[in-house]
Image (tube, grey):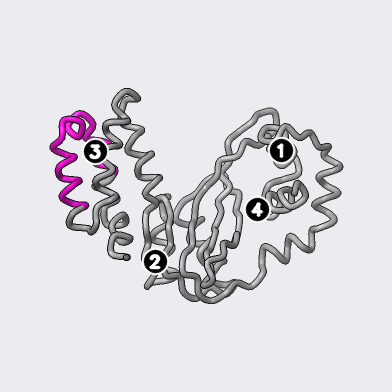
Amino acid sequence: GLDEMIVSLYAGGMTVRDIQAHLARTLGTELSHETIANITDAVLEEVKAWQSRPLDPVWPVIFLDALVVKVNDGAHVVNRAAHIAVGIDTEGIKHVLGIWVQANEGARFWAAVCSQLANRGIKDVLIACCDGLEGLPEAIEATWPFTVVQTCVVHLIRAANRYVSYGDRKAFSAALRKVYTAPDADAAETALLELAEHPLGKKYPAAVAVWQRAWERFIPFLAFP
């Protein structure tokens, strides 16, 4: 419900004013500053407990991503990233592990996030799926050395398409699909080489380069059944 959403946003570090503006823009819900403050005050201890609650030691999969939300910053509305960690437990159930609202991200920020998760009890992560945010893969590997870091394929597709004109995106996406649906890493590499030599690949080399740069973090999932 709405109360739970407010609690989650507050737990992630958003101010009452930020939450007020976010609800108005995304849901069309106008709540007074006092109403939101009353909700957050009533559950403040719950929020603190949620932010620091112990976590299971082993997680098969953790997803780390950023959602952009609009917040009031004085007289201006600005975009701010709400970083979220979602884990899938050994029974296949999803859990929100944490939310962090941060204006700037980087190696230091992600190192702090991973350290916080480790301090709350996470000892091992089998697969961490992320979109290559600056410093994140390195922070994951430093915290959990045996974790397989997998770049999100959807993010790679979107990143490549930014370099492709709208009229060519359908054809380019069809050619690109052969790469990420390949049965194994060797077949995927062959498909990428073919794409690079394809007329569309030559027309949009920057789009192909997105996949070339991310290659080592793209291919791990191809080894799984």
In front of the other: 87 or 184: 184
Label 3 element class: helix
In front of the other: 118 or 65: 65
Label 2 element class: helix
Kindly indicate whether the residue at mark 2 contacts the one at mark 3 (C-beta within 8 angstroms): no
Measuring 39% from the left and 58% from the top, which residue is drawn there?
137
Q: In the shown orientation, is residue 2 left or right of residue 158?
A: right
Mark seen at residue 12: 4
Asked if the magenta segment contains residue 59, the reply would be no
Amino acid type assigned to the residue bearing label 2 in the image: Glu
State which mark lies toward you, 4 or 3. Answer: 3
Q: Which residue is mark 2?
A: 141
Q: Estimate the x, y position of residue 187 in percent, counting from the top left.
A: 18, 54
Q: Estimate the x, y position of residue 67 in percent, counting from the top left.
A: 55, 44
Distance from disc 2 to disc 1, alpha carbons, whole Å, reads 36 Å
Does label 2 or label 4 sit earlier along the sequence?
Answer: 4
Location of residue 119 with respect to 62 vertically, above or below: below
Does label 2 or label 1 sit earlier along the sequence?
Answer: 1
Does label 1 or label 4 sit earlier along the sequence?
Answer: 4
